[in-house]
Amino acid sequence: MALMSGYRSTTKLALASSQPSVKAASKQPAIQVSNLSIVFDTNRGQMIAVDRVSFDVAAGEFVCIVGPSGCGKSTVLNTIAGLELPFEGEILVEGSPVGNPRPDIGMVFQQPHLFPWKSVRRNIAHGPRMLGRSAKEACAIADDLIAMIGLKRFADAYPNTLSGGMQQRVAIARALANEPRVLLMDEPFGALDAQTRAVMQDNLLELRDRIKATIVFVTHDIDEAIVLADRVLIMSAGPGRILREVAVNLPRPRSSAILIEPTYLALKRDCLEVIRAEGLRAFNQSDSS
Ligand SMILES: Nc1ncnc2c1ncn2[C@@H]1O[C@H](COP(=O)(O)OP(=O)(O)OP(=O)(O)O)[C@@H](O)[C@H]1O
């Protein structure tokens, strides 16, 4: 496998001691989340969904957030996107506080949410048009991205004629059309079958090398997190906190083929130990409360 030619055994697991605060290596992080807390009103009273979460993401870094269902992963991501207000704490993206959704922050969800009445090209051109680009410019941007995601033959097709994987590629291209500095992805491959998912992971790794955006990616799947990320943040069961940071120093370019490499398996085993211990802690806690 050509992508594996540079493979070396450089895996290093970095487990920080106890860290509510996870700092990126860069001096000027693209994303700075400081003491983020989010409380929801529910019919059983107030519920702390996210509890004093702090982390940085360096410019160009790929960070995955994993954790048990309901631990607040999506809430953290939505808040960075400006979709979850109000919140306690501070979030800076490219140095500016987040408030409302911003064109320099792209978001991709588990479901592609394409406009069913627009063709692939017009779905992707929509963002640039909204930002004031001419129809010609917007179509040129869309066509470049369509080539990048390998759907040239489907430029004039409508979403309902595409497979789930193809629709998700269009959703990613649509998010990239505004040239976001930051791309937030909430389980974008969660609804796909295993084979399509592996192909999409490889596509994303390739795209990532070309677009140089800072990416925060939420997933349940530890394999997916290790294949994609420079760092994995493991969240605890609710209320959500950052439990551990795991540095993934596997060489790039990578592909899903690293899943069978011994260094990869060692890294996965260490992550799973952290996740299993946390699962047990949460179970015992809920059992005794
Ligand atoms: N708008 C809301 N109102 C009330 N509670 C909410 C709201 N949004 C999320 N929650 C609750 O906050 C907690 C965190 O939800 P969130 O969706 O962020 O978790 P998650 O880790 O992304 O879960 P999953 O992996 O299952 O998608 C959950 O207990 C959820 O029920």
Image (cartoon, rainbow, N blue to C red):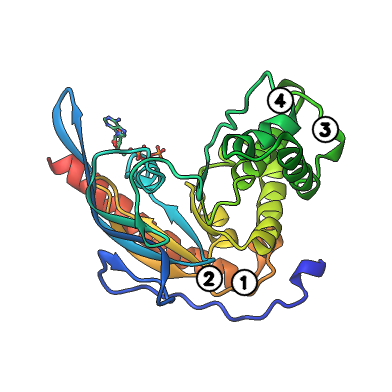
Q: Amino acid at mark 1?
A: Pro
Label 3: which residue?
Answer: 154
Q: CA distance from mark 3 to mark 1?
A: 40 Å
Label 1: which residue?
Answer: 262
Labelled pair 1, 2 in contact (Cβ < 8 Å): yes
Q: Amino acid at mark 4?
A: Pro
Task: Tell me the element at label 1.
Answer: helix
Label 4: which residue?
Answer: 159
Label 2: which residue?
Answer: 266
Labelled pair 4, 1 in contact (Cβ < 8 Å): no
Q: Is residue 67 left or right of residue 103?
A: left
Q: CA distance from mark 4 to mark 1?
A: 40 Å
Q: Earlier in the sequence, mark 4 or mark 1?
A: 4
Check the image and report above or below for 118 versus 125: above
Q: Amino acid at mark 2?
A: Ala
Q: Earlier in the sequence, mark 3 or mark 1?
A: 3
For discs 3 and 1, the disc positioned in front in the rendered view: 3
Please identify the quarter of the rendering in which residue 60 is found.
bottom right
